[in-house]
Amino acid sequence: MEEINVDMWEYKEAKAPDELYSGGVGPCIVIGAIYGRRGYMIHEPPQGDISSFIEPFFAGLRKDIRDVKKLKIYVIGGEIESGGDEEVRSSRNAVLDKIKEHGFQDVERVVQWCPTNHTQSMRLILSEGRAEIDQRKLFQKD
């Protein structure tokens, strides 16, 4: 088993028994998917038009998926600072729109946006066909 790190600006695919791992994210958005024993993960910072940057992820799914009912999609990140951030909100919406655009709106999915002052990570455990999402509060100085 190899742990494959998916860093910012990266898209990677893997097969069981390997695992895909996002590392810690806040405002970055990570989309992961499991289909059978295959995994897909993309890690992108929020940006004006994130939809063009996440398209390779969805293209990868489209080429492999034969039975959409067996697909699982996971989304984390997209932390919005307490003052709000339109770029992050726009990126969140673009991800959800892409899921619908590619016909994956009815698949099993978990969307867990990162709360303010937290960090998250995602691990796709392909040999078990499941994802682990970890969320931790960041340390604050008084």
Image (spheres, rainbow, N blue to C red):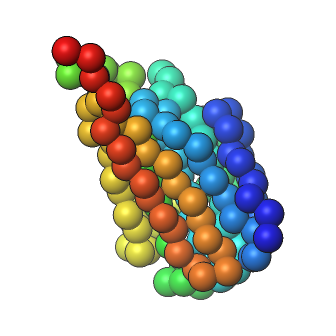
Q: Is residue 141 visible?
A: yes
Compared with 10, 84 (above or below) is above
**Image position, residue 74 (x, y; %):** 46, 60
Q: Is residue 90 left or right of residue 63?
A: left
**Residue at the (40%, 68%) spot, across then down:** 109
**Which quadrant of the structure image shows residue 120?**
top left
Q: Is residue 31 left or right of residue 39?
A: left
Residue for point 63% across, 53% down: 21
Give me the residue at 26% from left, 32% from top.
116
* Closer to the camera in the image, 12 or 58: 12
Depth check, front residue: 120 or 102: 120
The front one of 116 and 40 is 116
Residue 46 placed where, x, y %? 48, 28
**Quadrant containing the N terminus in the rendered view:** bottom right
Above or below 117: residue 5: below
User: Could you tell me which quadrant the C terminus lies in?
Assistant: top left
Q: On the picture, is 47 further left or further right than 23?
A: left
Q: Is residue 61 above or below residue 142?
A: below
Q: Position of residue 127 (x, y in %)?
A: 67, 80
On screen, 64 above or below 21? below
Please indicate, yes or no, whether residue 61 appears anywhere in the rendered image: no
